[in-house]
């Protein structure tokens, strides 16, 4: 991925390379008004000018690169098992959330295998523990920090979908909760 600084008006239709923070002095708040990867539109220009922006850093993805949010979602999809849902990606990270209460099942080796790749961080609660509906049980994070990843969000195995974990109500009850 290449980052280029260009004049504001030339940024229309291009993705931002960084979050842009806006300070609201009236309400004493500051937050990311524009997110990394957000495509700038003509309607954004007045707000950006009000924020004092004259130039923007934009991303140029190389052929075969995947945006960090897309890569995080692809990995989470590969790893997500039964009774879990995936949150929308943000800043190269997706969470795995329990959709029911039960016991979290997975092989720790799966986490270790993913974490051997320096571009990824996969975190999870300890296996074989009780979890509650709505609890975050794991997260996938694209860790290289460069915003672009060569398209290979396979969880390190390259063998297609192999669920990281599932939440089972009374132990692993289906084939998708067992791991190779």
Image: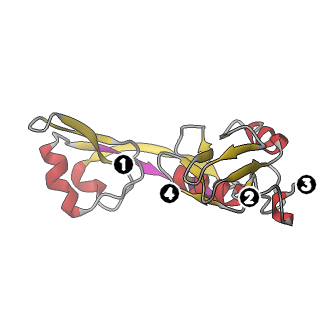
**Quarter location, residue 86:** bottom right
| Residue marked by disc 2 | 169
The image position of residue 159, as x and y in percent, is 84, 60
Mark 3 and mark 4: span between their CA atoms? Answer: 27 Å
Q: Is residue 59 left or right of residue 133?
A: left
Number of labels in the image equals: 4
Mark 2 and mark 1: span between their CA atoms? Answer: 38 Å
The image position of residue 124, as x and y in percent, is 68, 41
| Residue marked by disc 1 | 35
Mark 1 and mark 3: span between their CA atoms? Answer: 38 Å
Secondary element at image label 2: loop
Q: Nearer the viewer, mark 1 or mark 4?
A: 4
**Quarter location, residue 4:** top left
| Residue marked by disc 3 | 180
Residue drawn 60% across the image and 43% down it:
141
| Residue marked by disc 4 | 88
Q: Earlier in the sequence, mark 1 or mark 3?
A: 1
Span highlighted in magenta in the image: 56-66
Secondary element at image label 3: loop
Mark 3 and mark 2: span between their CA atoms? Answer: 21 Å
The image position of residue 32, as x and y in percent, is 30, 43
Q: How busy is the neighbourhood of tag 2: few (under 14 within 10 Å), some, or many (20 plus)?
A: some
């Amino acid at each position: 991925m290449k980052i280029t600084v260009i004049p504001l008006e030339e940024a229309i239709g291009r993705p931002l390379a960084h979050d842009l923070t806006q300070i609201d002095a009236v309400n004493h708040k500051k937050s990311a008004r524009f997110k990394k990867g957000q495509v700038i539109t003509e309607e954004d220009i007045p707000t950006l000018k009000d924020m004092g922006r004259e130039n923007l850093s934009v991303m140029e993805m190389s052929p075969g690169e995947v945006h960090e949010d897309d890569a995080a979602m692809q990995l989470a999809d590969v790893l997500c098992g039964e009774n879990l849902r995936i949150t929308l990606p943000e800043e190269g990270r997706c969470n795995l959330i329990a959709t029911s209460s039960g016991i979290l099942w997975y092989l720790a080796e799966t986490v270790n295998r993913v974490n051997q790749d320096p571009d990824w961080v996969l975190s999870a609660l300890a296996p074989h523990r009780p979890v509650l509906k709505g609890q975050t049980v794991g997260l996938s994070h694209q860790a290289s920090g460069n915003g672009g990843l060569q398209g290979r969000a396979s969880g390190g195995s390259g063998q297609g979908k192999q669920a990281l974990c599932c939440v089972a109500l009374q132990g692993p009850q289906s084939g998708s909760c067992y791991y190779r």
